[in-house]
Image: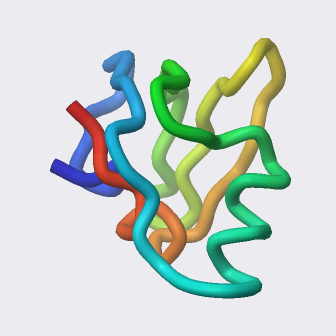
Amino acid sequence: MTLKEAKIGQTVRVKKLNGEGAVKRRIMDMGITKDIEIFVRKVAPLGDPIEVTVRGYELSLRKSDAEMIETE
């Protein structure tokens, strides 16, 4: 399952980050790394962006970035 498929109000744990180079580095710079818990706060009406809580702060992610984050 990817972060894009997570439901509102669900807490998921990051299993793996897909992507390469600058894209993967940008996701990691936002604080999203392996074994971190992410709480899905809101999803915009058209599904983009997704608002999550990571490491105690709120973050908005594009749908394309959320697809690269595998969760369990």
Q: Position of residue 19 (x, y in %)?
A: 48, 79
Rendering coords of residue 9 (x, y %): 37, 17
Image position of 60 with respect to 56: above or below:
below
Q: Residue furthest left?
A: 1
- Colour scheme shown: rainbow
Instruction: Report how many numbered discs are placed on residues in the image.
Output: 0
Could you tell whether 57 is left or right of 2 in the image?
A: right
Vertical position of residue 6 compared to residue 39: above or below = below
Residue at x 64%, y 42% (from the top left corner): 32
Identify which residue is drawn at 63% across, 58% down: 61
Q: Nearer the viewer, residue 2 or 29?
A: 29
Q: 51 or 66: nearer the eye?
A: 66
Q: State the image quarter where residue 20 is shown.
A: bottom right
Q: Residue furthest bottom?
A: 21
Residue 72 appears left or right of 21: left
In the rendered image, the quadrant that contains the C terminus is top left
Residue at 50% x, 37% y: name it: 34
Question: Residue shown at 78%/68% (left/top)?
Answer: 26
Please say if 37 is above or below 22.
Answer: above
Above or below 24: residue 13? above
Residue 69: image location, x then y, percent:
41, 56
Residue 62, percent across and down? 58, 69
Q: Quadrant of residue 71?
A: top left
Decide if residue 20 is on the left or right side of residue 6.
right
Viewer-proximal residue among 16 and 44: 16
